Image (cartoon, rainbow, N blue to C red):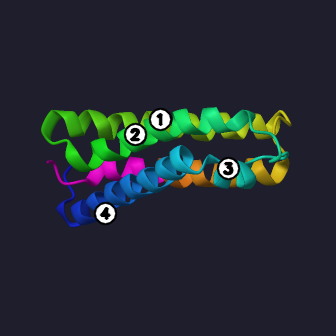
Amino acid sequence: MDRPTLRPCGTAALRTLAAIRLVNGTLALVVPGFLVRRTSADPGTTDSYYAFRLVGVRTIVLGSDLLLLTGEGQARARDQAVLIHATDTVCALVAGLRGQQPAWIARVTVGISAVNTALAVVGRRWARPS
């Protein structure tokens, strides 16, 4: 069942997701302390800086894939986006439920991941093929 009227919506969702990935990835890579202060109960420690930089690199590559790949490569990137962000959402939720993060951090990370998952699902389903 094709829904051509929703194609621009799906394409916009993928571009928005790519932009979010590029901004967050760049922040994580270049200024990890910015994100550590917003997601850590104890931002005075630097243990998370290395992890943020690693995730930043991954996130920049994933965002670039959504914008630059075409055809089969982009289809794979769209499929992977759903899996990646759904997994992020579940991990954030589990960490919050287990008390591994303060409640406010868990709510923020679940919310961000859930929005990214929704964008990935809409983009996968209704984006214009490249």
Q: Circle 4 sits in a helix, a strand or a loop, which is it?
A: helix
Q: Which residue is mark 4?
A: 12
Sequence-earlier tag: 4 or 3: 4
Q: Are marks 1 and 2 in contact (CB under 8 Å)?
A: yes
Residue at point 16% right, 33% down? Answer: 72
Give the percent coordinates (x, y) of residue 111: 64, 54
Q: Which residue is mark 2?
A: 81
Q: Circle 2 sits in a helix, a strand or a loop, which is it?
A: helix
20 relative to 74, above or below: below
Label 2 Cα neighbours within 10 Å, binned few <14 / some 14-19 / many ≥20: many
Q: Which residue is mark 1?
A: 84
Q: Which residue is mark 3?
A: 33
Is residue 100 visible to the viewer in this orientation of the structure? yes
Give the percent coordinates (x, y) of residue 69: 20, 41
First to last magenta residue range: 118-130
Q: Along the line of sight, which residue is nearer the eye, 112 or 48?
A: 48
